[in-house]
Image (cartoon, grey):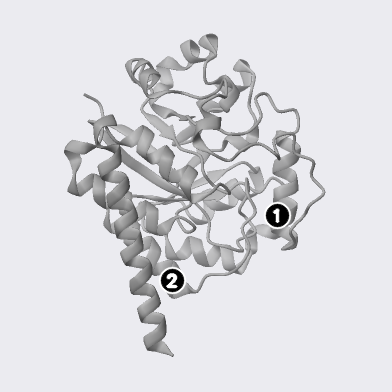
């Protein structure tokens, strides 16, 4: 059976949850689906202007960056940076903070999602050790353009979620299926006419370090729970995953950036864990995360 790779969200924001699920997959392999591996953890350190998709504010120290990247890489899991800000110009590629992040993680194991030529060219020239991945934020939705994208020198190409069940597209991609990554649980509005505009709004927020509230999202009032995304036409169920694998698709992405921790946990339990062991793994996650929170509180009190 071919290995099936899952790409998990929020390497920084969901750092504890992600490391817990990775450890549990190693400690209790019989309770997880056969052949499933964590292919990467994606996201950003707060405050990086190259970041796109979802704006994330704040800063992270160099020491904390090094610690977190090492924690994932030591578990043989690549860190994948979401360098998909759709408004980047050449002047932005020299940003000190983003280049520091790239320097710290420049060990040949880690990855970058891209969507702007100026940044892609800069990374290819200055950081050739990184695997480059074509981002879904490009919104490549017609077959001809998609096939051209696949021909380019990318490690993976992330499929637009609206194409998840498009038989013509899937059939055409079969010769390169191993280089396609599929979002399985997108919660956004189907065929949303404002999705590209939303990406630009988030990109502007990241560049300006300002929380913008002027974007009118048609999905804004929707429930951010896993059961709701399962109703979307782009959703891929566990029962359907094998049909994709049979065609050669082996990379699947779980969305979750900007979503509640419970949504992410429920997604992991649904996709990664065998049905009969979900309660067991859920309890393990809750126990370990509670123990971790208490340890952090005690450490903080001891520092006072």
Q: Residues within 10 Å of mark 2 (few under 14, many from 20)?
A: few
Residue at 65% x, 30% y is: 139
Position of residue 41 measured from the top left corner of the image (x, y, whole percent)? 42, 48
In the rendered image, the quadrant that contains the N terminus is: top left
Secondary structure, mark 1, is helix
Residue at 36% x, 39% y is: 269
Position of residue 20 measured from the top left corner of the image (x, y, whole percent)? 31, 54
Q: Is residue 207 visible?
A: yes
The tally of labels here is: 2
User: On the rendered structure, is 275 left or right of 126?
Assistant: left
Nearest to N terminus: mark 2 or mark 1: 2
Residue 99 location, quadrant: bottom right
Please tell me whether mark 2 or mark 1 is closer to you in this view.
2
Kindly check if marks 2 and 1 are in contact, taking CB atoms under 8 A apart as contact: no
In the rendered image, the quadrant that contains the C terminus is: bottom left
Between the C-alphas of marks 2 and 1, the distance is 28 Å
Residue at 54% x, 31% y is: 229
The tag on residue 64 is 2
Q: Is residue 73 above or below residue 222?
A: below
Residue at 56% x, 27% y is: 161
Q: Which residue is mark 1?
A: 90
User: On the rendered structure, is 28 left or right of 177?
Assistant: left
Position of residue 45 measured from the top left corner of the image (x, y, whole percent)? 53, 61
Position of residue 115 measured from the top left corner of the image (x, y, whole percent)? 62, 41
Q: Residue furthest bottom?
A: 304
């Amino acid at each position: 059976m071919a290995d099936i790779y899952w790409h998990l969200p929020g390497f920084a924001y969901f750092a504890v949850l992600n490391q817990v699920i990775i450890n549990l997959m190693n400690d209790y392999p019989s309770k997880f689906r056969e052949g499933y591996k964590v292919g990467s953890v994606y996201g950003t350190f707060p405050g990086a202007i190259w970041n796109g998709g979802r704006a994330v504010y704040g800063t992270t120290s160099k020491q904390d960056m090094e610690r977190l990247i090492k924690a994932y890489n030591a578990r043989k899991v690549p860190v994948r940076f979401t360098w998909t800000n759709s408004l980047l110009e050449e002047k932005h590629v020299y940003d000190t903070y983003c280049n520091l992040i790239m320097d710290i993680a420049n060990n040949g194991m880690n990855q970058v999602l891209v969507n702007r030529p100026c940044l892609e060219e800069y990374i290819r020239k200055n950081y050739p050790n990184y695997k480059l991945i074509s981002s879904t934020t490009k919104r490549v939705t017609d077959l001809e353009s998609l096939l051209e994208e696949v021909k380019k020198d990318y490690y993976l190409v992330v499929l637009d979620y609206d194409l998840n069940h498009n038989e013509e597209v899937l059939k055409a991609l079969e010769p390169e299926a191993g280089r396609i990554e599929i979002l399985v649980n997108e919660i956004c509005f189907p065929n949303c006419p404002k999705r590209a505009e939303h990406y630009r709004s988030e990109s502007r927020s990241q560049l300006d370090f300002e929380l913008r509230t002027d974007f009118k999202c048609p999905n804004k009032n929707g429930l951010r729970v896993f059961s709701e995304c399962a109703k979307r036409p782009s959703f891929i169920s566990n029962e359907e995953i094998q049909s994709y694998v049979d065609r050669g698709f082996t990379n699947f992405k779980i969305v979750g950036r900007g979503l509640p921790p419970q949504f992410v946990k429920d997604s992991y339990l649904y996709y990664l864990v065998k049905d009969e062991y979900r309660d067991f793994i859920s309890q393990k996650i809750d126990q370990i995360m509670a123990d971790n929170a208490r340890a952090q509180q005690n450490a903080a009190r001891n520092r006072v």
